[in-house]
Structure formats: structure tokens, C-alpha cells
Image (cartoon, grey):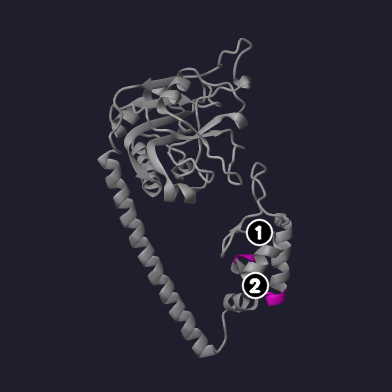
Amino acid sequence: MPTSFKLVRVNGIKDTRLDTSMAYGTTTFAEIAQMAEQPTRRSKLEAIGLIASTYNSPDARFHTAQRQHGRFHAFDLDLDDGNHTLAFLGTALVSVFGDCARIVYSTSSATAKAPKWRAIIPFEKAISGTDYEQLQRAAFEALSDHGIKCDTAMQGAAQMAFLPNVPPDMRDTAGVPLFYESLVVRTAGLKHPPAKLKAIAVQNAEREAAAKLEAEKVAREKAAQRAKQRERTGMLSPIEQFNADHDLSQVLLECGWEPRGHMWFASPFRGPLCRSLTSVPLASPAATLAMWERRRQTAGSHMTLGTCL
């Protein structure tokens, strides 16, 4: 099992360093293996998280940063569905990745009746964040052929995975976990991601490129049709008229969206654990709908929220 790589360690879901100059802490596969054999007993909000990348700068929890700068050394799998046994999962992992180093453990909310698992498959040769996302997806597809459904959120380059932890409320009065299982295989790790997963990733990329070209072709054809309609009638379509009369940036600001530079805006409908990075007041969904209704009435009764968006 590789031991030298120092991967991003996040000390709880609230651990964020974006507005600081502090890098994130790091952990190693050896430390994770030890943790799998003796899980921590933290609350869920304080549980240690992993991003399988060596890029630990203050922006390490952002997908764009990890895609650009990340150097990844492990597949990171989240398997909450299916009620699979550890033995069944182990067989599927060997079929996809080979009999290599791996760390598998039950999650903090797992029970004997509803087992849930995390799996970490290390490899030595670093890959970029973009390649990581493509290969994660390929791994999900390969495991689905064995009846294993992975959480696709783990495809994101900066998606955090919780490391082995059994919180106090999932232990008995003596502190023993009500349910916990793990498997640590310290054999030689993969040198690089399996070739069959690379092949799946290439096929996916080719299909997506073809779909993009087709979508662009359809968009050009529709644009040409609209242009002919304007020449024939001398009138804009309702959507074109609305866009001509209203500045989208101003509408977003009035509805509480937060500017992030250029034409990027952050949604006001964020979870309670997300920090507000600007002083722009957040609008409720009702307020946003009311704003769009006022715009609709100004543009004409034929406008709807769907067409405005």
C-alpha cells in the first residue's frame, strides 16, 4: 500500500480555509488504514473527511481548484444502497480493480440491517482532477455491472468522503459500536488506474463530444429558424423580447443571487452550513417567484416562469 502520499484531510464539514492563508491538514493511506481498524468516535459534523488529492491549498474544497491543480492517488467510493455484505462488495472490487491494496469500512450511519460502505482504492501514479472525475465515473459504471450502485456525487474532484468513524450515538453504553465492519488489504497498491477503466472513460468522452456536436447543430438550426421568423414577421419571439428588455444580471441581484465575478453568481438557496461570502441579502424562494411574476406582468401575460428562466 502506498505510504508517502499526503492527501487532503478536512476536520469536519465546517472546516473551510478559503478566507485564510492556511492550507488544509493531510493524512496518509497508512493512517486511514489504522483508522479503519479503530474508527474515531466523533459527531457527524466533526468527522474527518478526505479528498484523495495532494493539493491542500486554502481553495482545496472547490471542484474548479482540484480540477486545475489536484493530483489524485485513489478511487473514493460511497456505497449506501443495496444492503450488500462486506464479502459481496469485496468480490466486486477485486473484479473491477484486481486484488490490490484497499480500505473498506462501514459508514457512521450503517446498521446490520442496512449496511453502508466506503471504499478507498490507492494507486501510485498521480492523475489530474479532470482525469479523476472521468475515471471515478468509469469505476461507478464498472461496479454497476456487478450490482453495486455508487453515489455519483463522489465523481466531483473536491467531493469529501468521511473517513472511518462511529459517533457516540451509534455505540453502546460501553462505547462499543453497535455495528462496524472493515477490511484493510495492505498488499501492493495499483501502479495506475486499471486500463479497462481508462477505456470506459475514453468511450464516455467520445459519446459526450458527439452529443455536444449534435446539440450545437440543433441550436444553430433553431437559431436559423428564429431568424427566418423575424424576417417574415418583423417581430421577436416572447423570450427574445423579454431578454432584450431585462438585464439578467440585475434580475439575479434583485433576487438575492451573489456575484462571484464576470457572469458567475452564487445561488441564495444554500444549506445552513454554507457561509455567506458577501453582504448581499438572501432572497427566499417566495421572494424570487414574486420578482419573476412582476417581470412577467411587465413583459405580458404570455410569459411564464419557465420561459423567463
Q: Residue at x 49, y 17 (%)?
A: 38
Residue type highlighted by circle 2: Met
Q: Residue furthest front?
A: 21
Q: Is residue 97 left or right of residue 12?
A: left
- Circle nearer the viewer, 1 or 2: 1
Q: Which residue is mark 1?
A: 257
Q: Which mark is residue 303?
A: 2
Q: Residue at x 69, y 74 (%)?
A: 301
Q: Quadrant of residue 187?
A: top left
Of 158 and 182, nearer the camera is 158
Q: Position of residue 265 (x, y in %)?
A: 60, 59
Q: Residue at x 48, y 40 (%)?
A: 56
Above or below, 235 relative to 7: below
Q: Quadrant of residue 121?
A: top left
Residue 157 in view: yes
Q: Quadrant of residue 250?
A: bottom right
Residue type highlighted by circle 1: Trp
